Each structure stands twice: as C-alpha cells, then as structure tokens.
Image (cartoon, rainbow, N blue to C red):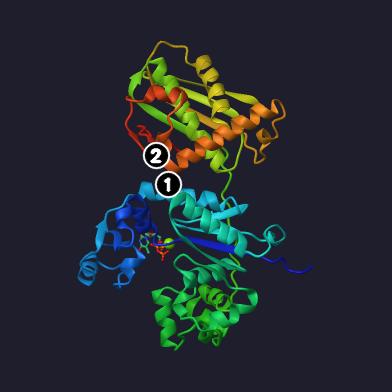
Amino acid sequence: MAPRKTLIFHVDIDAFFASVEQVLDPRLKGKPVIVGNGCIASCSYEARRFGLGAGMSLREAVKRCPDVIILDGSEKVYRCYSRSVFEHCLRIAPSIETFLDEAYLDLSGTEGLYGSPFGPAAWLKETIHKETGLTVTIGIGRNRMIAKIATKDAKPDGIRWIRPEQEDETLIGLPIARLPGVGPKIGKRLGHLNVKTIGDLRQVSEESLVKIFGKIGSILHMRCRGEDTRVIHAREIPRTISRETTFHKETRDRDEIEGMLHYLSERAGLSLRLLGLETRTVEVNVRYEDFQSNSAQRSLPRYTRLDGDIYETALELLHRIDTRRVNLRHLGMTLSGFSTHHATQLGLFDPQGEIQRVQLQETIDEVRRKFGHQSLVIGKSLNLLGKLEEESYGFVLRTPSLTK
Ligand code: TTP
Ligand code: MG
C-alpha cells in the first residue's frame, strides 16, 4: 500500500500580543509597540525594524527605540483572540492542535475537497483578518516540522508551502538553530563540531549523534532529513462540560438563581459548540448555606447544542431539586452524553423552526465572538444585570467555571 500522503498547516499569529493591542487601539497601528514586563514578550513588526525582539530588556528596547510604546497586556483578552482564530481554523480542518498563538491543522486527505492547499490557506488568512483584525502566517508541509519551518520563512502575513520535492534544497542551507529541537545548548555543542547548517548535520552519523546527545541524537538525525513523526493531537472530547459558581452572597432570590442558571447554561452551551459537540444529558446541582446539597440529571429526548434546550431542561431540574426554603450557596450544571453529529441540523421534528433556532444560536455566538459575550445579555441572564460585575468576557463569577 502506498504511504498515506500527509498535509499539515502551521498557523501562527503575527506579533500576537502587540497586534491585539493594535487592533484594540487603532492609534497604535503602524507604531513600534511592545508588550512585556521587564523584558519584551511580543513586539510589533514596526518595533522589530529598530532591532527589538522577544526576550530583550525593556531598558535596551527604549535605548534602541526611544518612541517605543510599552504595554502591560492582558492575558485574558489575548486568549479570547487566539480562541477566535482557532475557531476559524476548525472550519477548514477536522483536527487541530493549538498552543498559545499557533495551531497545527491536519489537512491530510483533503486534496480532493480543496485542490491546492493555497486555496484554503488564503481563505483562512482572509477570514481571520476580517473577523479578528489579526494577520497570521501559514506554513504548509508534509509534516509539522516542515510546516513550522515554512511559517518562519513567510513571516509576517504570508503563506509558504514547502512541497516534498523542495524539502532538501530548503533545509540544507538553513542555520542549525532553525531545526526544531536544537536549542542554544545543543546548538553550541554542534557549533564545536563545526555543524553550522542543517546540511552539515546530515554529514554526522546517527551513531555519533547518539553518542553525544543520547536519545535526542536519533531525533536530530531524522529531523535534519526532514522527517518528523509527531502526529497532530486533536482536541480531546471531554466526558463532561461543567459550569458552576458560588453566589457572592447566599440567596433565595428566584430571579437571581434562575438568572445564574441561564448564564451557566449559556457558558456551557458555548463550550459545547466550540468543541463541535451536541449533548443529551443535563445535570443540575445545588448546595445550601448549611452545606446540604442535592442534584438531579435528565436525558433529553434528542441531542441538542442550543442554549434554549439546555436551559429549559436545567430549569426543570432546578425546580425538582431546589425544594428547601434555605439560602443557596452554590449552583452548578454539567452536560454529558456527547455526540459529534449535528442532529439538530436535520430538523426532524419541525424542520423550519429547528433551522431558525440553530441559525439564531449561530448569530448570537457570532455577535458575541465579535463584540464580547456581554454585548448580548438575553433571557433570564438579564436578571443578573446590576447584581454582578461585568467584563466583555461575561459576568464576573465568584468561582471561575471549569471544564472537566
Ligand atoms: P511568538 O509566536 O513566538 O511571537 P509573536 O506572535 O509575538 O511574533 P511572530 O509569531 O510574528 O514572530 O509568540 C507568541 C506570543 O507568545 C507572543 O506574542 C508573546 C508570547 N511570548 C512571551 O510571552 N514570551 C516570549 O518569550 C515569547 C517568545 C513569546
Ligand atoms: Mg506568533
């Protein structure tokens, strides 16, 4: 059997933190911007022209570029942006692996669907830019290492495909530090052996490399030949998705309790949709101020990914279990019984109504993705307005939600 042809995209956000700051405050566009505390974490391409780069001390940065704009940054905001970028990646690849601002997409076997990889790559870049304001660079290759090397060559705002037949000519001339796995320490030892390029490394036998570096020696021997056996690990499908919180102050206020349940349903529902799942089982649990607790779960008649269905079931469960006249301290909900098939799209029962509900949900998600969750406070979540602090991500809960 012929070996399976693989195709990997490596998507990396350009000057990630600094670019988000430039999107949020357009006055920063075109200016040298750095984000960091003590030293540079991220640096706009305008700042790089002055010789600034990640890891450099801020003092040195100011010396080289007196007009540089230095910002502290906010991890939470950056995470929202990377999440949004990754969501778009999931629109072209069934399986992606993500790190802070980069994603590996496994597009193996999609040639029949997309033809040349430049098509989906260009579409992805354009969509990400339109939806988030950020630019990404996409490297394409037969494995993740080749794809990453291609990204580096195409930075910023580029696309580069290193085809299998171009690998040798591309790799051999590259400085040895560009080979994934070669950090400063290994680089230095290789330098002593007069190995300066990836091509030079090919001249060293595997035996010698293993003698010097141990196990990593074999890996280097493979990598300098363009081989990388690491696979793309898709996101794991969790067994459950939970959202829970402790009330800021114990409460018996029905509006507040139902409002919170609605909000937790929305947050759990969003996670469900981001993972491309549908759920069939909803569980609600309560804990009272005397620490007694109660919980119940129910299976839905069919799979759903709609907040409305989740909340409706959760509310029924709440009414069933919350029968004491004692203040509530804690409220939680858990979704389980997942499916990756989108049964609701089929609209078996009321096709028209069902399609409309799905479309409405998608529109709500879209608006929130663009303008923040709090741009649309709807349904019973309205009961929480004025009771809880808000930020664009959502209401500020006392217990941050957890996904298990
Ligand atoms: P990188 O992708 O390495 O850098 P970048 O996105 O700023 O620039 P480019 O990809 O265009 O070369 O890292 C992504 C983010 O990780 C970066 O914006 C900030 C953060 N980071 C740190 O916090 N500390 C560091 O030392 C580095 C290198 C990055
Ligand atoms: Mg980056």
**2 or 1: tag closer to the N-terminus:** 1
Residue at position x 25%, y 60% in the image: 69
Q: Is residue 54 visible?
A: no
Q: Residue at x 58, y 53 (%)?
A: 234
Residue 40: x and y, percent?
30, 63
**Position of the N terminus by quadrant:** bottom right
Give whichever of 336, 363 is nearer the camera. Answer: 363
Dots 2 and 1: beta carbons under 8 Å? Answer: yes
Q: Report the residue that reaches farthest toward the right.
A: 1
* Mark 1, other Cα within 10 Å: few <14 / some 14–19 / many ≥20: some
Tag on residue 331? none
Residue 393 is labelled as 2
Question: Residue 351: percent from the left, percent from the top?
Answer: 69, 29
Q: Secondary structure at mark 1?
A: helix
Q: Is 20 located above or below residue 43 in the figure? A: above
Nearest to the observer: residue 133 or residue 291: 133
- Residue 80 got which mark? 1
What amino acid does circle 1 point to? Answer: Cys
On the image, the x and y values in percent for residue 7 come to 63, 64
Query: Residue visible at 23% across and 69% down?
Result: 65
Instruction: Choose top left, top right, bottom left or bottom right for residue 254.
Output: top left
Instruction: Give the left or right position of residue 242, taking residue 56 as reference.
Output: right
